Every structure is written in C-alpha cells, then in structure tokens.
Image (cartoon, helix red, strand yellow):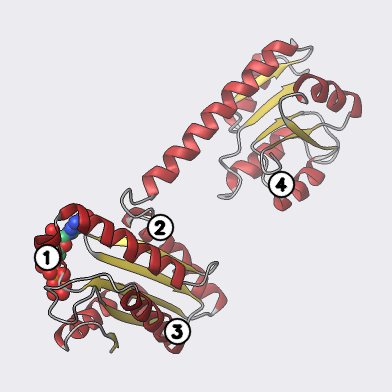
Amino acid sequence: MADRYILVVDDQMNNIETLGEVLGDEHDIHFALSAQQALVQISQQMPELILLDIMMPDMDGFQLCEILKAKVETRDIPIIFITSLSTPAQETRGLEAGAVDYIVKPFNASIVRARVHNHLELKRTKDLLRVLSQTDALTGLANRRRLFEHLDAVQDKALRLDQPLSVLLIDVDSFKPYNDLYGHIAGDVCLQRVAGMIQSSLRSVTDMGARYGGEEFCCVLENADQELALQIAERIRANIEALHIPHLHSMVLPIVTVSVGVASSTSSNRSLHANLLMAADKALYVAKDKGRNKVIVL
Ligand SMILES: Nc1nc2c(ncn2[C@@H]2O[C@H](COP(=O)(O)OP(=O)(O)OP(=O)(O)O)[C@@H](O)[C@H]2O)c(=O)[nH]1
C-alpha cells in the first residue's frame, strides 16, 4: 500500500539494498541516504516505521530520532536502530532516545523480519485504539474527548494565524417524544441520519462535526467568521429538515428538525475563545425558546 511504507535511513547504499532484500517482498521500502533527506521525505509522506542507522555524516541517527520524537506529528512512528554500535551504553542511548528496538549488525534476516512485523502490528493496534477512543460508536463522528482536543488545537491556531473561529451547537428538537413514539432503536437510527447529514453539510477540510451529548452535536468551523458560520448552520438546519424523517409528535413540524446555536470569535475578541461553547449554548437555548428549527447567534 502506498501510504504504508518503511523508511530505511542509512548513508551506505549496500546496507539499504540488503534491507531491501530482507523486507522488500512483504513491505514497500523507501530509503534516505542522510538524516536531512529523511526529514524531507517524512514531511512529504509519513512512514509506518523507520529503520535507522546511527553513524551518518552531519546528523547522526540518535539526533534524528530525538528530533522525530520531539514533534507531535512524528513522535508515534516506531523507530528501530540498525547499527554496528554494539555496547550496552549505545543501545541504552538508542532506546532512551525513543526507539522501540535496537538491532546490532551483522543481523539475522528472519529476526529482522519478525521484529519489523511485531512492531508494525503493535503500531496498527495502537492506531486503531486511538481512533476508537476518539470516535462516537453510534454515529461515527468525533466524540467529546476528540472535540475538546481539537478545540484546544484550533484555538491556538486561530490566535497564531489571526483567523476567526466559530462553533455550532445543534440539538434535535422534541427528541424525547420521538423516542417515546418510535422507540429507542428508531431514535438511534434517527441520530445516525442527523449525524451523517451534519457531516456532509460541513466543509471537508476545515470543519469538524462531533457528538457532544445524547441528541446534541457540536461543529468546530476553522477560519469561519460569523457570516460564514451562519451560512453553514442554516445549511445544516435546512438539510436535516429536507431529510423528511417523520416525527408526528414534534412540537415544530411533523418531521425531525434541529435548533442551532452559533458563536464566533475573532482574534480581536480573544476573551471569547474560552467561552465559545458557552456562547453557542446560550444561543441554542434562545433558538429553542423562540420555537425551535432555528439558527440563532447572539
Ligand atoms: N435513541 C436515543 N435517544 C437518546 C440518546 N441519547 C439521548 N437520547 C434521548 O434524547 C432525549 C432528549 O430529550 P430532552 O433533553 O428532554 O429534549 P427534547 O425532547 O429533544 O426537547 P427539546 O430539546 O427541548 O426540543 C432523551 O429522551 C434521551 O433519552 C441515544 O443515544 N439514543
């Protein structure tokens, strides 16, 4: 698979070729002849695992490992040192720099294959667990934990880049009567459809939809001022209405509708950043109070 490759970093071409022969049948192998070249390649496409030599001119393997472990984007890439430096002190230094393993040359081909296999399995399991721990099981949207992590990150970014940031709080109207009339399982299906429509009404790269609570959703809109946030909120409201999911006991219409609270901040109004959710919640309350199926900004 193109997005699953192993990067071999070694200044000796013959070492790269040997590892290519050992692993090439089962893995996509890319190589870099220096630490600098490796950094460029990693910034273009993230490898699944790195096999790293230590003694290289300019920057050695220990330094490269430390740089990669210090960056959020690269710190989870497993690094295996593969080197002729064999003292316990050198091996300790490699493992303390953050490597998952340390293989001394000359190596045994089947042991290298087995270790690479094991570390890839471990990495894939960790990745899967991370995704599961950040995903809402019913709707597939981001869960609250992921939402708050994301909000922290985008708030910092908005301040740094001097960009506006908006959030939407979306609540399904009269959902208790929906459950009471159609049953809890139908209620779950309704939430899935609403979540799917929220997701597909957002901009793909800059927006995130999350399940905030039971029948409540939150969207984080990067680089969106109040005007754009209102447009997106209205699109979500109208698209959900257009699903025409029957709801004969709704106090609004005989179909499922949502109310939306909108809050926006600009970098000239920094104090709002911490309070965006609270402001959106107040706007949502007003949307409910004014009859539901509405988008409100205060
Ligand atoms: N089916 C289903 N129902 C849920 C889930 N989470 C929360 N609910 C239900 O959502 C309903 C929310 O009801 P309320 O908070 O009273 O609000 P409402 O009836 O939607 O009224 P308004 O929000 O004021 O329009 C409750 O009956 C919850 O049991 C879920 O995961 N599945």
Give residue 135's position: percent from left, percent from top: 38, 50
Residue at the disc numbered 1: 176
CB of mark 1 near ligand 1 (< 8 Å):
yes
Specify the quadrant that holds the C terminus: bottom left
**Mark 1 residue element:** helix
**Mark 2 residue element:** helix
Residue 18 visible? The answer is yes
Residue at the disc numbered 4: 42
Q: Specify which label sits upstream in the sequence, 4 or 3.
A: 4
**Mark 4 residue element:** helix
Q: Which of 53 and 211 is in front in this view?
A: 211
Query: In the image, which is nearer the foreground, mark 1 or mark 3?
Result: 1
Q: Do the residues labelled 1 and 4 touch (CB within 8 Å)?
A: no
Q: Which mark is residue 102?
A: none
The crowd level at tag 4 (other Cα within 10 Å; few <14, some 14-19, many 20+) is: some
Hey, what amino acid is under mark 1? Lys
Query: In the image, which is nearer the foreground, mark 1 or mark 4?
Result: 1
Report the side of 270 relative to 183 (left or right): right
Cα–Cα span, label 4 and label 3: 34 Å
Q: Do the residues labelled 4 and 3 touch (CB within 8 Å)?
A: no
Ligand 1, by image quadrant, is bottom left
Q: Quadrant of residue 200?
A: bottom left
The residue lying at 32 percent from left, 57 percent from top is 144
Hey, what amino acid is under mark 3? Thr
Residue at the disc numbered 3: 266
**Mark 3 residue element:** loop
